Image (tube, rainbow, N blue to C red):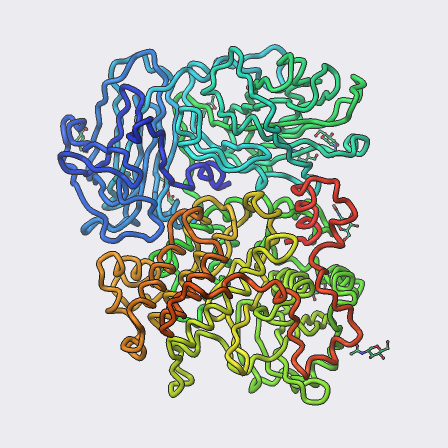
């Protein structure tokens, strides 16, 4: 099995380390933070952390070469240390002075780029630390390519070496011709001894002395909580991820968060074991304490077989306070690791954290490369409630001589996904290399997904016949089974759709659709997407419609259609495209929309099919404002935040009055209620528009739409494709290029020459400033849709010579939410339908409004199967 899992941890290379009180980096004394190939003096990374040159540790230097990467991937989180490297053409050793009795983090950073004449695909090498093999036959290029990463980081924890020096040896493979080794950054940080002995699961009274062992970090999860950055960690600069991608089955329990009045009381346990953030969130089985007896709360992890793993579980109970209120069994790979666990019994009280270590040997063999962790109530102890709880998990690979594993292979799913990626179809002329090179931003996002998909895919195989609700993860494109088109004629999708769409939009028979589109006549095709084709059609007495037809082969299409129907049937807004109805029959699925006479925003900018009709600056501003209103409604107008996830100029449609309407809700997700945080999800969207923070963290917030919208703004200004691989590297991505030009003060040079002279400088400045803010690296620095609207209105007023300040329409008109655009010719379709616009998700949630928002959200998403 491939090594996806072990790479998971290192997928995201954000290096925000601990800031001292004065804002400077506080490093543990004796830490070495080396930027390999850096010149004398070193350099600071984006967070102000100092990286020192590595040359003085090479003794002797065996002919290594300092080099600079030939190009900078847009998704590099920081130029330092990734843009410089040290290349080794023969075996070369670093020597570091260390403390004999200290445990160390060793973190290695690799960015497989072109270095002078060294092509990353030729690089195969091994790395050893005092004789412990960390990597062998390692190809950073293959690894990154397989996971679509721009760069990878690895974390090892080296046991006290009982030596004053650490030798770190890079050795090019002698099996591959011309192989070389390289490294971009090395961190060597002394840490407290984190480990002791741990019980060996499956053996009575057997202990493994982990204290003396070296480890590789495989997974580190904040169960029931959010991503924790190195700076938020309790002193050891670790990253903790959300656990949802690893949950197995439909019963994923509920998440809990300690209330403000609960203080996490570490007592004698050192705080560095795990930060408060980890202990103050948890996952438990659910509120129905009698139903809980019937299931196990389960997580699955992909690991390398034939290895030992340390599983560290973190617990902290902050709701119950008595012994025997909750007692559960902990199973690892179906063996009891801990019978009758009682967290209060261990800790003695509320808010007191603790952790337990277990070692498990994962054997080689079919299906054995997974590590299962399950919690089940222990009825035999007659606890008060049937429930179980977990706050955090860490999984480390253990071995004293060899921690290496094979290079991963790109999964079929990943390849397929890349091929199918919307907005990036083959017919647009991009090759796969361009995906990796020119749009590594987007590509990096899928890395996480590739790894996750393995888990989820396997999950799906194990749960026959429930393909629409096995997981709340968007299992986009990873399962092309036939399951949803079931044998009974009436599909699962259809059953769902019927219920969802009941009374909300019209059902068309296939016959009607065929009539409308002249049996899907090719001459009526007005658009093509990853999902299939869009036809122009005529229904009833001449009403023009757009018919989106799902590609019958694509289950992804089915899911997107469902999402779109759910979203659109609940939302009505002047600046959102209107769904008239749908059809599902004989494996055909179609959505029927109001026809938008003037097509997409993009084709008026530069696809050039209407060259005589250059949009004026004012028109562009008005279109942007309209689209912003639509998005603002999505983010704040409905009961739940809705994140569009695929904002781009081809998804902004224009009616015959140039009114902008946001379309294509196939990827949209409902978020938790406002201010409740983010949605953790597989990264989806279109290359060139993808929020870099979203793919770094896989955490979706409405600010990801704001980022994409910022790209749209620059597209409106510059009238060029967001990705153009024919241009020099730094210009390929519009977002990057526009930001760079703006920094250099040359933004004027890239404005659409057709309108350049007509834009008032004040309007331009306001607009560009706004767009730039949208592209801020961190979501928190980006404006809300409301601020954005206000600024765009302001830019419009400046253009029209008003002073702008008195304008009030940026205050979004409440009425607009209810303003249903019943174009004359559409009214008949709605005659029979209940048009109360408050259908937004309320029927799902009102009935159990006592539940926590998280729970409701989870159930909502669960029921959608996306
Ligand atoms: C230098 O490279 C040669 C050839 O690969 C190797 O035999 C030798 O051990 C290396 N020296 C050191 C100090 O690494
Ligand atoms: C829970 O896990 C145990 C051990 O793997 C298994 O025997 C049992 O069938 C599981 N229960 C359910 C409901 O899946
Ligand atoms: C360490 O790795 C080697 C090589 O993969 C393997 O043979 C050995 O069994 C491993 N040891 C442990 C304790 O997992
Ligand atoms: C553990 O049990 C589950 C069913 O509960 C099964 O699907 C899985 O293969 C088992 N795993 C191992 C490692 O035996
Ligand atoms: C090294 O890795 C490559 C790519 O994964 C593989 O094709 C090759 O067989 C490996 N070579 C050895 C000697 O293991
Ligand atoms: C899946 O959804 C169907 C209804 O759509 C429901 O009957 C079934 O119990 C669900 N399955 C699981 C595993 O939740
Ligand atoms: C789907 O199932 C139908 C009937 O069961 C079969 O004819 C068809 O080949 C299947 N399609 C795919 C893509 O497997
Ligand atoms: C409206 O309802 C009537 C009677 O229920 C039905 O005959 C008619 O077809 C419906 N119209 C539409 C547009 O669905």
Q: Residue at x 51, y 40 (%)?
A: 1
Residue 849 placed where, x, y %? Answer: 74, 44
Along the viewing direction, whichever of 703 and 207 lies nearer the viewer: 703
**280 lies above or below 790:** above
| Residue 146 visible in the snapshot | no
**369 lies above or below 344:** below
| Left or right of 633, for residue 696 | left
Residue 754 placed where, x, y %? Answer: 31, 80
| Residue 673 visible in the snapshot | yes
> What is the total number of numbered labels drawn onto the structure image?
0
**184 lies above or below 717:** above
Along the viewing direction, whichever of 126 and 698 lies nearer the viewer: 698
| Left or right of 466, for residue 651 | left
Q: Give the residue at the far front of this rendering.
A: 806
Task: State which image quarter holds ligand 1.
Answer: top left
**534 lies above or below 123:** below
Quadrant location of residue 848?
Answer: top right
Task: Look at the image and tell me in which quarter the C terminus lies.
Answer: bottom right
Q: Residue at x 38, y 47 (%)?
A: 144
Quadrant location of residue 143?
Answer: top left
| Left or right of 6, for residue 642 | right
Q: Residue at x 26, y 34 (%)?
A: 171
Residue 588 placed where, x, y %? Answer: 69, 72
Residue 412 placed where, x, y %? Answer: 51, 54
């Amino acid at each position: 099995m491939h090594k996806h899992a072990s790479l998971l941890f290192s997928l995201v290379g954000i290096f925000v380390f601990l800031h001292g009180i004065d804002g400077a980096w506080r490093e543990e004394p004796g830490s070495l933070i080396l930027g390999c190939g850096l010149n004398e003096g070193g350099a600071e990374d984006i967070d102000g952390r100092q990286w020192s040159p590595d040359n003085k540790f090479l003794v002797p230097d065996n002919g290594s070469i300092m080099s600079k990467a030939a190009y900078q991937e847009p998704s590099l989180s920081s130029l330092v240390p990734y843009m410089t490297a040290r290349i080794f053409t023969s075996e070369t050793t670093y020597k570091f002075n260390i403390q004999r009795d200290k445990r160390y983090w060793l973190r290695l950073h690799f960015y497989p780029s072109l270095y002078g004449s060294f092509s990353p695909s030729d690089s195969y090498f091994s790395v050893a630390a005092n004789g412990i093999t960390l990597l062998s036959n390692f190809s950073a290029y293959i690894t990154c390519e397989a996971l679509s990463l721009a760069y990878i980081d690895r974390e090892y924890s080296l046991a006290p070496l009982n030596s004053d020096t650490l030798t770190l040896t890079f050795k090019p493979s002698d099996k591959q011709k011309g192989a070389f080794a390289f490294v971009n950054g090395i961190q060597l940080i002394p840490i407290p001894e984190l480990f002791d002995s741990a019980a060996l699961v499956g053996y009575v009274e057997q202990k493994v002395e982990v204290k003396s062992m070296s480890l590789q970090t495989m997974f580190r999860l904040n169960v029931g909580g959010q991503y924790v950055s190195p700076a938020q960690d309790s002193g050891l600069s670790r990253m903790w991820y959300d656990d949802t991608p690893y949950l197995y089955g439909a019963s994923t329990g509920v998440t809990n968060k300690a209330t403000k009045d609960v203080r996490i009381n570490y007592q004698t346990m050192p705080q560095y074991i795990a930060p408060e953030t980890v202990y103050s969130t948890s996952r438990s089985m659910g509120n129905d304490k009698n139903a809980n007896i019937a299931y196990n709360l389960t997580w699955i992890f992909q690991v390398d077989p034939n290895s030992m793993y340390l599983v560290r579980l973190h617990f902290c109970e902050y709701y119950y306070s008595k012994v025997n209120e909750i007692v559960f069994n902990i199973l690892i790979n179906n063996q009891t690791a801990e019978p009758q666990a009682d967290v209060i019994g261990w800790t003695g009280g509320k808010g007191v954290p603790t952790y337990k270590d277990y070692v498990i040997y994962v054997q080689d063999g079919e299906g054995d490369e997974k590590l299962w962790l399950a919690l089940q109530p222990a009825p035999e102890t007659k606890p008060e409630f049937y429930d179980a709880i977990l706050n955090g998990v860490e999984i480390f690979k253990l071995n004293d001589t060899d921690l290496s594993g094979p290079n991963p292979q790109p999964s079929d799913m990943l390849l397929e996904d890349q091929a199918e990626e919307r907005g990036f179809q083959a017919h647009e002329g991009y090759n796969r290399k361009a995906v990796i090179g020119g749009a590594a931003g987007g590509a990096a996002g899928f890395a996480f997904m590739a790894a996750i998909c393995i888990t989820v895919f396997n999950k799906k195989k194990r749960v026959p016949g429930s393909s629409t609700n096995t997981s709340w993860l968007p299992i986009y494109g990873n399962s092309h089974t036939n399951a949803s088109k079931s044998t009974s004629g009436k599909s699962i999708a259809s059953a769902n759709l019927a219920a969802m769409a009941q009374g909300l939009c019209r059902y068309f028979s296939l016959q009607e659709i065929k009539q409308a589109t002249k049996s899907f006549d090719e001459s009526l095709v007005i658009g093509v997407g990853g999902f299939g084709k869009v036809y122009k059609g005529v229904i009833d007495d001449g009403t023009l419609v757009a018919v989106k037809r799902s590609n019958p082969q694509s289950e992804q299409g089915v899911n997107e259609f469902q999402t779109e129907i759910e979203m659109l049937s609940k939302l009505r807004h002047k600046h959102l495209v209107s769904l008239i109805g749908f059809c599902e029959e004989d494996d055909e699925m179609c959505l029927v929309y109001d026809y938008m006479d003037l097509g997409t925003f993009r084709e008026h900018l530069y696809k050039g099919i209407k060259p005589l009709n250059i949009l004026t600056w004012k028109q562009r501003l008005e279109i942007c404002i309209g689209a912003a209103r639509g998005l603002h409604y999505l983010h704040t107008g409905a009961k739940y935040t809705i994140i569009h996830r695929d904002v781009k100029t081809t998804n902004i449609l224009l009616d015959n009055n140039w009114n902008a309407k946001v379309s294509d809700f196939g990827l949209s997700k409902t978020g938790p209620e406002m201010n409740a945080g983010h949605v953790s999800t597989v990264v989806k969207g279109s290359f060139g528009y993808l929020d870099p923070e979203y793919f770094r963290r896989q955490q979706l917030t409405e600010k990801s739409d704001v980022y994409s919208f910022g790209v749209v703004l620059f597209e409106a200004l510059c009238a060029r494709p967001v990705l153009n691989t024919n241009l020099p590297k730094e210009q390929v991505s519009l977002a990057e290029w526009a930001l760079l030009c703006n920094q250099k003060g040359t933004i004027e040079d890239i404005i659409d020459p057709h309108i350049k002279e007509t834009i008032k400088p004040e309007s331009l400045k306001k607009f560009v400033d706004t767009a730039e803010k949208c592209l801020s690296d961190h979501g928190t620095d980006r404006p809300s849709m409301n601020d954005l609207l206000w600024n765009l209105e302001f830019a419009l007023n400046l253009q029209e010579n008003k002073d702008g300040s008195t304008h009030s329409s940026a205050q979004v008109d409440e009425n607009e939410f209810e303003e249903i655009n019943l174009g004359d010719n559409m009214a008949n379709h709605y005659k029979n339908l209940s048009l109360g616009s408050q259908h937004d998700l309320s029927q799902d949630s009102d009935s159990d409004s006592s539940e926590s928002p998280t729970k409701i959200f989870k159930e909502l998403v669960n029921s959608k199967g996306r």
